[in-house]
Image (cartoon, rainbow, N blue to C red):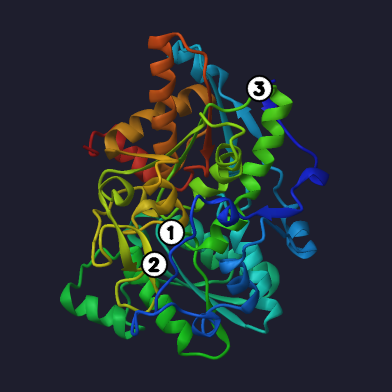
Amino acid sequence: MPIINLSQEEIPTHYYNIIPDLPKPLDPPLHPGTKKPIGPEDLSAIFPMELIKQEVSQERYIEIPEEVRKAYYLYRPSPLIRAAALEKELGTPAKIYYKYEGVSPVGSHKLNTALPQAYYNKLAGIKRLTTETGAGQWGSAMSFACQHFGLESMVYMVKSSYDHKPYRKIMMKLFGANVVASPSNLTKSGQKYQAEDTNHPGSLGIAISEAVEDAVSRKDTNYCLGSVLNHVLLHQTIIGQEAQKQMKIAGDYPDIVIACHGGGSNFGGLAFPFLKDKLDGTKPNLRAIAVEPASCPSLTKGKYEYDLGDTAGFTPLLKMHTLGHDYIPSPIHAGGLRYHGSSPIVSLLLDEKIIEARAYEQVEVFEAAVKFAKNQGIIPAPESSHAIKAAIDEALKCKETGEAKVILFNLSGHGHFDMSAYDDFMAGKIK
């Protein structure tokens, strides 16, 4: 069965919250000024109370609002696909499956959390949302979600991506968003970096600072984030829950679950529902691999410590694997993975050796992406291609050992707006 679909009635009714199943409690976020644990009142300036509750919830399952579930009907459930042509090309006994989130209206998994975030802000009486975006996938999702629920949106797009991905910018504007390159001249934090370097490539940390500064300056405005925070990863678990049902239909269960990693939403969305089985002892040998770019290796080379989530110091201090909030990654094509830190949940799981992490160079990621595209007919986003590279490597190991392992990865978005990156690769400009 090469493609496994579910009916809309089988869309999950609840998000899965992994926090109650973690081997130990998360370290609390700290106030950047006092260094003391923050409370709901500290977050209420930029988040609605329902999302703050989800951020700290100890409930294992949190109900999906009916209006959000109806909005998911636009594209969910997403298909689970057996990569049979790729298996044949590799000559591997492994079975390779991928969950394809590129079917969403904006072409990626990011809409899974953008819709509930916009919904909860709408309920709270908020009129306008600000956010940052790296490659533009999150900005596109938030722009669409705001349009869907009748909110204004303001997007600070990392300058390197703003320049290299014009069609993402156009898509956001088409959905009604105001989009500017970050660092911009609209905020004090943006002006600071512009003054230092008029050609500053930007970073997600700087863009977050600008979006938060904008949000706190207006009473009608809140801020929303596309990754890292607990409630964001919570919303993405709709991916893994669907995949569990689809793998059951296929008669398989993954030995290895793989997803790319920037802040953690992509990886957590697919892996967390399966990791529940590992944590409760049902599947103790399950492997979960988070894959990141070698140019921004927060998991593989970052320190596990408290750090700011942004560059200017507006956000709480989070206990996470981090390269330092001042870290400016190289302007790689996988702009959505250029973040200095990681989700506190993913960081704890890595520190407890429950999951694995690895990093790849840009050229080997594009080699894997082209191989996948030629065999499966889908041109993947550069971010998602990190997971493809790891899946191919694991399948080739099976070829050496003769083991018929089951590999599942998240193809979190298509690369239709990344043609310039593929053009650079084919011209030999990516080293």
Could you tell whether 42 is left or right of 176 in the image?
left
Of label 3 and label 1, which has the lower sequence position? 3
Residue occupying the point 43% across, 64% down: 27
Image location (x, y in percent) of residue 143? 57, 66
| Amino acid type indicated by mark 1 | Pro
Residue 186 numbered tag: none
Query: Can see residue 418?
Result: no
| Amino acid type indicated by mark 3 | Pro
Residue 2 numbered tag: 3
Instruction: Name the residue beneath numbered marker 2.
Output: 318
- Location of the C terminus by quadrant is top left
| Amino acid type indicated by mark 2 | Leu
Image location (x, y in percent) of residue 395? 44, 20
Mark 1 burial class by Cα count in 10 Å: few <14, some 14-19, many 20+: many
Residue occupying the point 68% across, 75% down: 150
| Viewer-closest of 104 and 390 | 390
- Location of the N terminus by quadrant is top right
State the SS at label 1: helix
Residue 344 numbered tag: 1
Query: Can see residue 79?
Result: yes
